[in-house]
Amino acid sequence: MQVAAIEADGLSVQYHGTAVIKGVSFSIPAGQKVALVGPNGAGKSTLLLALDGLVEFSGRVVIAGTEMNASSGQQLRKRIGFVFADSEDQLFMPTLLEDVAFGPLNLGVQPGDARRIAEETLALVGLEGMGSRSSHHLSDGERRRAAIATVLAMKPEVWLLDEPAVNLDPAARRQLVDIIRGLEGTVLVASHDLDLVVQTCERCLVLDDGELVADGPVGRVLADEGLMEGHGLEVPLRLSCGRKDSG
């Protein structure tokens, strides 16, 4: 039996006595790309933070067969790649090359090898030759790709992406779609961009008011007009157009 890459069992989170994640349970097998969608304030970002052990929670989180707790959290986080909604949270060194090499160096990689890994990783996300530049001189799309590169360089088994398409123009968004499609490992992406979800994910979790209200294939879940309307969402254009064309 295959061990799940991500497993949540009765996962709950409270902020100042208010429940923001309420007994959520799901399991994601290794290699699956899964979307986490829901209206503003549904708790998507908080759920991702809990899966990475970055906020206190009750219930169980298991990553690749190991339960997340105080003693295992630091080691488990080396296997998890978290791409935050604000790219600046991950770009803080003077140059992009140093930003991307930072993770491998912290994993014990020798400086020369870390530099090589950083250069190769920047090339993989379309930023070849830009290692000497500061993140402050990049477009939003370039910063997003650079943030992904800082995680990609560490070769995580599990990816957690929080609103990766925010503030991207159409060209940058297309590049992001290609990058997400090419990610190895298990991917959980929280996004309001439901067309991006259709393009990159095979399964969809719907979260509303901290509760998991739907879980199934992307095409089935996001095409359900009643479900979408009932939870403050709209059927993505790619699916609604296809349904109209077939009619």
Image (tube, rainbow, N blue to C red):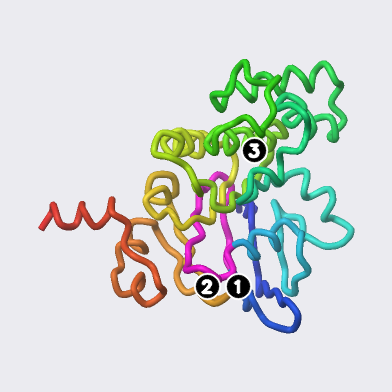
Kindly report the distance in space between the C-alpha atoms of the residues bearing marks 3 and 2. 28 Å
Residue on which the image places disc 2: 212
Question: Which range of residues does the magenta coloring cover?
Answer: 26-44
Three-letter residue code for mark 2: Leu
In what element is the residue under mark 3?
helix
The answer to whether mark 1 and mark 2 are in CB contact below 8 A is yes
Q: In the drawing, does residue 70 fall left or right of residue 49?
A: right
- x 70%, y 54%: residue: 63
Furthest-front residue in view?
137
Three-letter residue code for mark 3: Ala
The residue carrying pointer 3 sits among few (fewer than 14), some (14 to 19) or many (20 or more) residues within 10 Å by Cα, namely: many
Measuring from the top left, give residue 5's x and y in whole percent: 64, 52
Residue on which the image places disc 3: 147
Query: With respect to residue 233, does 79 lie above or below?
Result: above
- x 66%, y 34%: residue: 136
Measuring from the top left, give residue 21's x and y in whole percent: 63, 74
- x 63%, y 64%: residue: 47
Quarter location, residue 142: top right
Q: If the image is split into quadrants, where does the C terminus sit?
A: bottom left
The answer to whether mark 3 and mark 2 are in CB contact below 8 A is no
Residue on which the image places disc 1: 24
Labels 3, 2: front one:
3
Q: In the drawing, does residue 205 fall left or right of residue 44?
A: left
Q: Is residue 35 magenta?
A: yes
